[in-house]
Amino acid sequence: MDKDITFKGVPVSPGISVGEVYLYVRNNFEINSRDLIPEDIEKEISDFKRSIEISAKELSKIRNYSYEKIGEVNSLIFDAQLEFLQDKFFLSQIIHRIQNEKRTADFIFNDEITKLEHALLASRDSYLKERFEDIKDIKNRVIRNMKREKLVSKIEENQIIISHELTPADTILFSKRKVLGYATDKGGNTSHAAIISRALRIPAVVGMKDITKSLKTGDNIIIDGSAGIIIKNPSEKTLEAYREKIVLLKEYEDKLKEIIDLPCTTTDNKEIELTANIDFDEEIDFIVNTGHCGIGLYRTEHLFLEEGGFPSEEKQNAEYKHISDVVYPKNVTIRTYDIGGDKLLPRSEKEDNPFLGWRGIRICLDREDIFREQLCAVYKSSINKNIRILFPMITSVTEVRRIKEIIKEVKGELEKDGIEFDKNLKTGIMIEVPSAAILADELAAEVDFFSIGTNDLIQYLLAVDRGNDLVSNLYQEFHPAVIRTIRQITDAAHKNNIQISVCGEMASNPHAVMIFIGLGVDELSVSPSRYPEIKQIIRSISYKEAAGVCEEILKLSSETEIREKIKKFNRTILNENSVTRLL
Ligand code: PEP
Ligand code: MG
């Protein structure tokens, strides 16, 4: 038997488990498309209503269990599914079609939901694409109940679930059987199954393409949710190495719990602000769990995605006020819509080069009505005085000056209406386009703070698409041009006495922390899952030493040399228990 056969996917929930596979195959029910005779129509409709009721009952039970297990915020998907299932307009449309077309309820219901699925799948936005699974779950549930079938699964305790796809309901229900891990052919980082497995703290890897064809029930595997891999038939040597890793990780996690309340300072007492990036509401719990860290980047695109359009000022106001209350007394940096690029657009036309097209602040300045509404909502939510506002995709001083004019008008209107708000609310800009980096000195004179968006800065600086696998080897965080540009931006910020933060993914890379510290960055805003680890690393670095090594790094002209220098530095300063050693 071949040993150590490794499969790679997208890591979505960290942790390591060793166990047996349970291959979960969901039943596909045949759709009955026959014509109905008039006498059968009423019965068909009452059977349909009954299956909706049973499905709603099932979902309520799942929701209640989920509330108990992972809390209200993480369980919102089940409320949304229930709401959809009980939508009066949708149901009456189906009943109307059964009466008019005289076709079976399963045919009509399937047809209506399939239309919706196609619309979601056709979306260029990965978040919306993944909502497809949530809708599909409702479809399967109702059709199963129309066929009066029971949900059956023969899973035993302590198994690793392998499936083509997993719905949020599957994920939560399987967890009752002490599941050790999940892996699926399909899915992405923002699928609800991924979010739920993170909340359950069960390792999960998705997007494994055809893992269901390579594994069967009973196979022995290792699932590594941090690296995004599955190892089939692990050899004794591999098992031993992983057992050791599990022990180390456990020790490390315990250690992290100890440091969570400690100050975020370097060994020579330079204070670094460590904050979190928040993309979805589900992540807000994290803020509370870390003893209320601040938010360095609150992406508002999710409001647009969930709403399928621009949310009302009231809805935004409620959302921003809520987040400001949760984070208080720490700060939250709310970024105005950065739609376009790889995210959804408020119109259907395709652009040849979306990353170089109608995106971020360009849309806001073209659609001033929408922009003013968002600004109004942010200002109205600012009475705690802990909100800052951040503008994405800035390329020129002219844009910043226009934004400031609009802000002045918005504030004037609020004052005229006697609405209370934070008059000193700080405004900042993302530095993520080379032109903004070049103009950093002039831009710094216009705003209160900078936030470096390394994700875009690297793609625009090196002309490498941030999401294209074919050129991923050229997307180099430690390219000399990247490091020197960060230095230039940081110096411009400090020369003008404004704060400099980094909120791109590079800030969450443990190996890169010494670079940011050494170059003099004031704040790092990182993914929630990396937060404790980055804090531990900051607490192990001497600012003075890192600054010295950065001076040497700035003279190097190749990425390989820079990597070597960083590795050498990190080897000497990171202590024995750092997870970085395991990466
Ligand atoms: C960035 O570009 O680094 C950034 C934080 O913004 P986004 O990833 O949302 O484009
Ligand atoms: Mg960006």
Image (cartoon, rainbow, N blue to C red):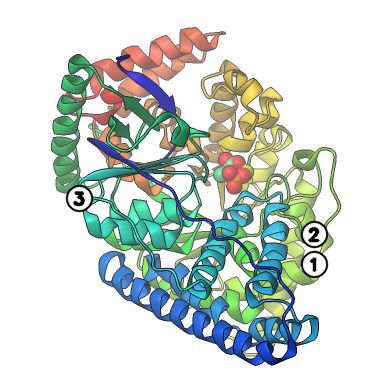
For the C terminus, the quadrant is top left
Q: Nearer the viewer, mark 3 or mark 2?
A: 3
Name the residue tied to disc 2.
Answer: 365
Q: Nearer the viewer, residue 371 or 217?
A: 217
Q: Nearer the viewer, residue 478 or 546?
A: 478
Q: Which mark is residue 194?
A: none
Q: Quadrant of ligand 1?
A: top right
Is any part of residue 274 visible from this angle? Answer: yes
Say few, some or many: other residues with alpha carbon within 10 Å of mark 1 (under 14 / 14 to 19 / 20 or more): few
| Position of residue 562 in the picture relative to residue 338 (left or right) | left
Say the numbered circle drawn on residue 157.
3
Q: Secondary structure at mark 3?
A: loop
Q: Which residue is mark 1?
A: 368
Q: Amino acid at mark 2?
A: Leu
Q: Are marks 2 and 1 in contact (CB under 8 Å)?
A: yes
Nearer to us in this view, 120 or 369: 120
Alpha-carbon span between mark 3 and mark 1: 56 Å
Q: Callout 3, which amino acid?
A: Glu
